[in-house]
Image (cartoon, grey):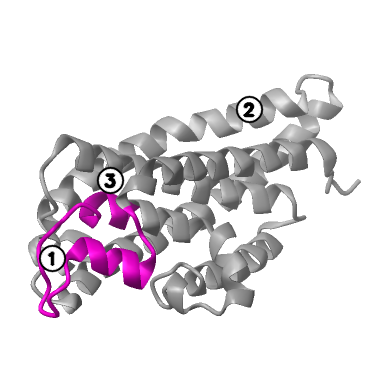
Amino acid sequence: MFGTIFWNLGSKRERKQDFFNAMGSMYAAILFLGVQNATSVQPIVAIERTVFYRERAAGMYSALPYAFGQVMIELPYIFVQTILYGIIVYCMIGFDWTVAKFFWYLFFMYFTLVYFTFYGMMTMAATPNPTIASIVSTAFFAIWNLFSGFVIPKTRIPVWWRWYYYICPVSWTLYGLVASQFGDIKDKLDTGETVEHFLSSYFGFKRDFVGFVAIIIFSIAVLFGFIFAFSIKVFNFQKR
């Protein structure tokens, strides 16, 4: 669906609007797939948490090994999802076929889906039921959307709010995807400036920073997984 909607947008670089369209395809995919992963995992965690309470009371389960298993079992499913989505959409959108750019695209999409999934698990583990977890997570999704750097680029965000851009996971995903795909392109736009310069001046994206962005995205996924494990260990919402 995304591939047909954004057909061949990645190869169009004559106007600023072409670039915004290509960036919008990444932005839409991040939020749609990410939020879907986060919300769909919450009911599953809620059901399995009930089983965990019963088995822990019987002395069969320990919190941290259970949480570790919950985290690890999601990784292969997300990997398959990323491969299927990434290959199909990358071809249809028309990004440059280089090994490095394709790898970065899959890398950022994979760990983005991972941290969204872990975020859904984390909110479920820290709240009593799926209804409250959904309310909490949805509130943050709206804020992440606002500070993602697409609706309002970092250079246009007031200085006193820019700190939230730096702690917003979606902003780093968008940074990594856009900078890795377009950060080294010297083609000139209709305004006369190169794509590389436009990225740097308007969005603050630099190709040389992609490696650090990858570390940040990985760290966010690890952080959400750790908070999930901590919440499972500390909080007990079982009603006797």
In the image: residue 34, left or right of residue 179: right
Question: Residue sitting at 74 percent across and 51 percent down?
Answer: 126
- Front position in the image: 196 or 226: 196
Residue 75, compared with residue 5, is above or below; it is above
Span colored in magenta: 177-206
Q: Quadrant of the N terminus?
A: bottom left
- Residue 132 percent coordinates (x, y): 70, 64
Q: Residue at x 70, y 42 (%)?
A: 227
How far apart, in angstroms, are the residues tagged by discs 1 and 3?
15 Å
Disc 1 + disc 2, Cβ < 8 Å: no
Mark 3 and mark 2 residues within 8 Å of each other at the beta carbon:
no
Answer with mark 1 or mark 3, whichever residue precedes in sequence: 1
Query: Which badge, 3 or 2, comes first in the chain's sequence?
Result: 2
Nearer to us in this view, 96 or 159: 159
Q: Please, which residue is most extreme toward the right here?
A: 240
Estimate the spatial distance between the alpha carbons at disc 3 and disc 2, rounded to whole Å: 27 Å
Separation of residues labelled 1 and 2 (CA atoms):
40 Å
Residue type at tag 2: Phe
> Is residue 211 depicted above or below 30 in this figure?
above
Question: Hey, what amino acid is under mark 3?
Answer: Tyr
Residue picked out by circle 3: 105
Q: Which residue is mark 2?
A: 68
- Residue 39 image position (x, y, % from top left): 53, 57
Q: Which residue is mark 1?
A: 9
Drawn side of residue 70 relative to residue 92, left or right = right
Disc 2, SS: helix
Q: Amino acid at mark 1?
A: Leu
Residue 105 shows in the view: yes
Residue 6 lies in quadrant? bottom left
Q: Is residue 44 left or right of residue 20?
A: right
